[in-house]
Image (spheres, rainbow, N blue to C red):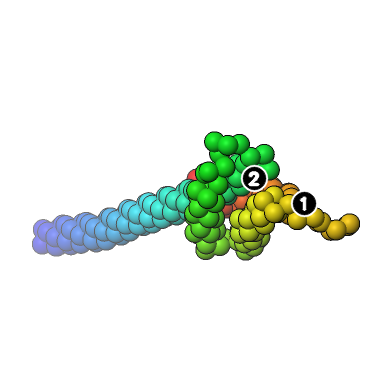
């Protein structure tokens, strides 16, 4: 009887010990699973936060690039507008000098003052273009500005020549020829500037493309 009780006790203890061991193993296994799941969730959250940060940085770069593109466009357009004002004013003044009308002759000095002011305005715009770049566009803006600066002196020489009627020797250029030469050179420089400015804008747009 005693042996039977002992066997039963040992069996019960073995069962309890086995159950405890199984429970311990199961507990540790569940803890490892929970830890692995928590780590996976942490890594997923970190990855999502990094992706969001990259998206925000790309959006900021895109917005900055769009501001740069818009600013450069405005700088170029202002320079062209000021250049057109000088060109138009020079044409008007040259026409009055070459084909004087009684009602316009008295306004020549005022027209010269307006032309000088327009050249100064164009000079300010040219400085902005030179700061904005790129180098090829800056150089062409300087060349355009050089032509613009030659217009008022050429027109003043033309005015004196028309007033004095000084003869011109064979093969010599008249002030009228000089004015036309400056005007033609200006138009050529302007065409080249417009092409270079358009190319520079296209380059900026291409650079900004992948981040859109």
Task: Report crowding for label 2: few under 14, some 14 to 19, many 20 or more residues within 10 A (C-alpha).
Answer: many
- Residue at 50 percent across and 52 percent down: it is 113
- Using the image as rendered, state which of residue 19 and residue 184 is in the foreground: 184
Task: Report crowding for label 1: few under 14, some 14 to 19, many 20 or more residues within 10 A (C-alpha).
Answer: few
Q: Could one spot residue 179 in this view of the protein?
A: no
Q: Could one spot residue 197 in this view of the protein?
A: yes
The quarter holding residue 21 reads bottom left
Nearer the observer: mark 1 or 2; the answer is 2
Residue 197 position within the rendered picture, expressed as x and y whole percent measured from the top left: 62, 51
Residue 150 position within the rendered picture, expressed as x and y whole percent measured from the top left: 65, 59
- Using the image as rendered, state which of residue 194 and residue 26 is in the foreground: 194
Q: Is mark 1 on a helix, strand or loop?
A: helix
- Residue at 58 percent across and 37 percent down: it is 102
- Using the image as rendered, state which of residue 4 and residue 135 is in the foreground: 135
- In the image, 212: left or right of 20? right
Residue 131 position within the rendered picture, expressed as x and y whole percent measured from the top left: 52, 63
Which quadrant of the figure contains the N terminus? bottom left
Mark 2 highlights which residue? 97
Residue 127 position within the rendered picture, expressed as x and y whole percent measured from the top left: 52, 62
- Residue at 35 percent across and 54 percent down: it is 49
- In the image, 149: left or right of 21? right
Spatial separation of the CA atoms under disc 1 and disc 2: 14 Å
Give the mark nearer the N terminus: 1 vs 2. 2
């Amino acid at each position: 009887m005693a042996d039977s009780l002992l066997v039963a006790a040992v069996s019960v203890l073995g069962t309890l010990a086995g159950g405890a061991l199984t429970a311990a193993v199961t507990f540790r296994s569940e803890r490892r699973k929970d830890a692995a799941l928590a780590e996976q969730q942490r890594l997923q959250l970190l990855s999502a936060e990094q992706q969001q940060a990259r998206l925000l940085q790309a959006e900021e770069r895109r917005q900055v690039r769009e501001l740069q593109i818009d600013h450069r466009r405005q700088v170029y357009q202002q320079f062209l507008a000021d250049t057109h004002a000088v060109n138009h004013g020079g044409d008007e003044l040259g026409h009055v000098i070459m084909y004087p009308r009684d009602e316009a002759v008295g306004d020549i000095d005022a027209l010269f003052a307006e032309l000088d002011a327009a050249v100064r305005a164009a000079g300010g715009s040219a400085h902005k273009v030179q700061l904005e770049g790129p180098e090829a566009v800056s150089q062409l803006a300087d060349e355009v500005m050089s032509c613009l600066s030659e217009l008022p002196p050429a027109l003043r020489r033309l005015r004196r020549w028309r007033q004095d009627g000084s003869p011109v020797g064979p093969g010599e250029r008249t002030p009228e020829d000089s004015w036309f030469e400056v005007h033609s050179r200006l138009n050529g420089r302007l065409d080249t500037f417009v092409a270079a400015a358009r190319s520079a804008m296209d380059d900026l747009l291409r650079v900004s493309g992948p981040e859109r």
